[in-house]
């Protein structure tokens, strides 16, 4: 009896390995919806609960599967981004061995509203350039980026090719390295209709929202961005340390 129990308990791991193998081999591609749990249960000759445990195991260990409603969908393997390092999207993607991509959707001049002025550290109604881009990794869209740039960068950004993979590459070619300081506000949100359409997800799919204001080495405002990532495609890491001289021993 104990041996049979162990066999049953490990069955879901064998099924998980088979499903993960199908993803690795390309038999299941990014965006594919898996058969229902009932169909998979019939295929493998097990209870539906065993299938559910197998799928959850793939979700937690491989980060390439997630549940949408009652079905499971294959998505790009979750990529970790360290927000304690001040890098652009393109710089991060290349640093972890992937190919960044981008496409400009809107680019308009305007006057800074109160939120933009506060984030950039400028007075309200100063000229700004607002740009909206769809960013991808290895040709898979994972983030909608809305950025406001101050007046000094407007001529450079305005000449950005629509299919430029990275704004930072263009800026650094024109002005050299710029980013020196950034503040990040991280939250979760549901996509608005435009975000859902661009990312190809439903309105109930969670997004990871990162609002960033950045400044240059000489203190000038650089950007205020509102980045909305597919939560299934990326995670953010933050590294903390104790203040110098503080003991970590419990008392």
Image: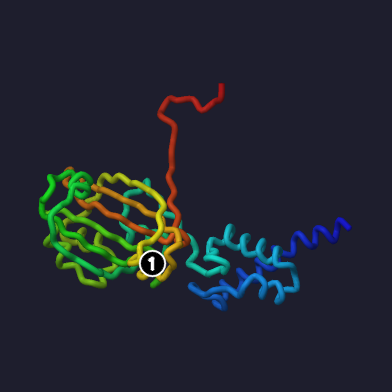
Circle 1: is it few (<14), some (14-19), or many (20+) Cα within 10 Å?
some
Q: Quadrant of residue 104?
A: bottom left
Q: Quadrant of residue 91?
A: bottom left
Residue plotted at (59% across, 58% down): 61
Q: How many labels does the image show?
A: 1
Residue plotted at (25% across, 59% down): 168
Residue plotted at (24% across, 52% down): 224
Up-down: is 236 above or below 239? below
Q: In this view, does 144 lie to the left or right of 33?
A: left
| x and y percentages locating residue 138 in the rendered image | 40, 70
Which residue in the structure is indicated by mark 1? 196
| x and y percentages locating residue 88 in the rendered image | 31, 56
Q: Is residue 172 left or right of residue 34?
A: left
| x and y percentages locating residue 74 in the rendered image | 52, 69
Q: In which quarter of the image is residue 55?
A: bottom right
Residue 71 makes an appearance in the image:
yes
Q: Residue furthest top?
A: 251
Quadrant in the picture for the C terminus: top right
Q: Is residue 71 left or right of residue 166?
A: right
Colour style of the rendered protein structure? rainbow
SS state under label 1: helix
The answer to which of 113 and 53 lies nearer the viewer is 113
Up-down: is 18 above or below 149? below
Residue plotted at (19% across, 60% down): 130
Quadrant in the picture for the N terminus: bottom right
| x and y percentages locating residue 66 in the rendered image | 54, 64
The answer to which of 147 and 246 lies nearer the viewer is 147
């Amino acid at each position: 009896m104990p041996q049979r129990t162990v066999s049953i308990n490990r069955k879901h791991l064998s099924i998980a390995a088979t499903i993960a193998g199908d993803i690795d081999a390309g038999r299941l591609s990014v965006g594919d919806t898996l058969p229902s749990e009932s169909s998979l249960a019939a295929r493998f000759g097990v209870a539906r609960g065993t299938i559910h445990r197998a799928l959850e195991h793939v979700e937690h260990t491989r980060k390439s599967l997630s549940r949408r409603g009652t079905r499971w969908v294959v998505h790009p393997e979750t990529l970790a981004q360290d927000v304690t390092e001040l890098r652009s999207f393109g710089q991060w993607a290349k640093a972890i061995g992937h190919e960044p991509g981008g496409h400009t959707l809107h680019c308009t001049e305007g006057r800074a509203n109160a939120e933009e002025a506060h984030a950039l550290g400028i007075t309200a109604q100063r000229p700004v350039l607002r740009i909206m881009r769809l960013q991808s990794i290895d040709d898979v869209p994972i983030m909608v980026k809305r950025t406001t740039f101050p007046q000094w960068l407007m001529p450079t950004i305005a000449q950005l090719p629509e299919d430029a993979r990275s704004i930072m590459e263009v800026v650094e070619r024109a002005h050299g390295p710029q980013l020196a300081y950034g503040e990040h506000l991280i939250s979760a949100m549901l996509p608005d209709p435009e975000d859902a359409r661009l990312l190809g997800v439903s309105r109930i799919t969670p997004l990871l929202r990162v609002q960033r204001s950045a400044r240059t080495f000489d203190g000038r405002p650089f950007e205020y961005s509102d980045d909305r990532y597919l939560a299934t495609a990326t995670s953010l890491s933050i590294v903390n340390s104790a203040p110098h001289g503080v003991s970590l021993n419990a008392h």
